[in-house]
Every structure is written in structure tokens, then in C-alpha cells.
Image (tube, rainbow, N blue to C red):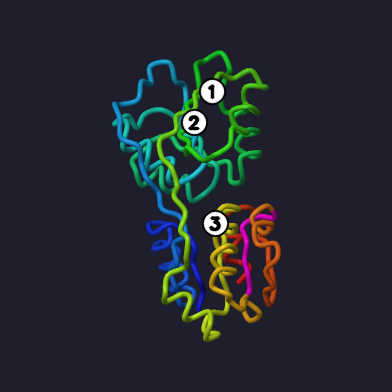
Amino acid sequence: MRILVTRPAEDGADIARRLGDLGHDALLAPLLQVRFSDGEALALDDVQALLATSANGVRALSRRTERRDLPLFAVGPQTAAAAAKAGFLRVRNADGDAVALAEAVSQWADPGAGSLLHAAGADGGGWLAGALTAKGFTVRRENLYRVDTATTLPDEAIRALHQGQVQAALFFSPRSAQVFAACARRAELSLAQVIAVCISANTARGLDGLSFADLRIAAAPNQAALLACL
């Protein structure tokens, strides 16, 4: 199958390689662009562990500290893999979403042992910090990057969709799904032959109003489960 990949460029290139290994052809159409925030090295003396809810959070942390000894609690496999690649030595994987991470952290950390630093995006919500604060933790949120959104799909993707050359599209976040939906309406695309594959039900809701050949939701909120839907 020819599969549209809507992830930011770096993550998109990785999923394209994985799709190639499975015999598919990836068409990259990044709808989100990550902008990392420059600044001084992060003060981590009072921090017992780092929280990362995306691979971009890990990349942002890597730019703002040289320390790799602190435990890093990752939301899922891709984030954990990015942390290992960046050299973090003590990585734990919640293998889920923010809810799973909050539950795991309550088992992995002690509220009295120091604060938790969440490497966050400026556009993200504060649910994780609120959930952990309710469990007695002190959470320090650091907005280390922002994500800009595209206003149109790449020309190649628009042509391929108009010509019926795309059989599936992958959606990894509610925001990317919402951006795609806006771009698809703007370009007056027909998606009747495209299978939409979403990492979560919340992501699928971002596509409301679009008509696909099928809409599939991963059994778990991770890349492996998403690819298993193909």
C-alpha cells in the first residue's frame, strides 16, 4: 500500500523506514513542525526524575542538559527509544498514554524524594501535572518546544490523493488529525478510497466530518499497535 504519513519530519522518516520493511510505500506529508526553545541549561538539582510524553520532549531535554543519569519516565515505546538513543541511562516505559504514565509514575517514584520535571510542549495541556499533583508529587513543567501547524498538504500528497494513489493514512495525535481535516477540506479531497488509521479514539475524533473507506483505531496507543491495523 501507499500510505500517507502525517508525522513531523524526523519521526516521519523513521516510520517510513518501518513501513518499507513491511512492504509499503510511505508518502511523507508532515503537518506539524517542531521548534525547540533555546535557553540556559536546566536546573535539575532538586529533580528526582524526568517525564517525557513525546520523542520531541526527549530531544528538547537533550538540548538543554548534558545529564543522562536521572531516571526518565517515558509515555510509550517511541519516546523510550528516543531517550535510549539520546543516551539516557535509566529509562522506564509506561507503554501507553498520559493516563498510563501517571499511574506508572506513582509506582516508580516517591512524592517525598524530589520534584518531577515534565519536558513539555508549549501547546500541550496540563493534565499530567494535575494528575500527579493530586497524588502528592511536585511537578515542574518546562515548555521546551512548540509545534507549528501546516496550512496545506504538500503538493505531491494532494496530487496522489486526488488521483486515488493513496490507500491509507496514519494519524498519531488529535492535533495532526485536526490539521489534516482542515487541509483536506481546503483542497476538496475525496478520501473514499483511503483507510484512516488512528493511534487513539481521541485522535479519530479529529477527523470527524471526513468520509473514509474505513477508520481503524489502534488497540493500544503506540506505534506497534497502529501498524498492526494495516
Question: Which amino acid, mark 3?
Answer: Ser
Q: The residue under label 2 is which amino acid type?
A: His
Residue that mark 2 sits on:
118
Q: Does residue 105 sit above or below 224 in this rendering?
A: above
Front disc: 3 or 1: 3
Instruction: For marks 2 and 1, give the CA distance.
Output: 7 Å
Look at the image and say whether residue 135 sits in the magenta stretch: no
Q: Residue at x 48, y 36 (%)?
A: 120
Nearest to N terminus: mark 3 or mark 2: 2
- Closer to the chain start, of discs 2 and 1, is 2
For the residues labelled 3 and 2, the Cα–Cα distance comes to 22 Å
- Asked if labels 1 and 2 touch by Cβ distance under 8 angstroms, the answer is yes
Q: Secondary structure at mark 1?
A: strand
Task: Magenta stretch: give its range.
Answer: 195-201
- Could you say whether the residue bearing mark 2 is in a helix, strand or loop? strand
| Circle 1: residue type | Val
* Residue pointed to by mark 1: 139
Residue 86 spot, x, y in % from top left = 34, 43
Residue 109 coordinates in the image, percent (x, y):
56, 24
Q: Which residue occupies 56% across, 65% down?
A: 170
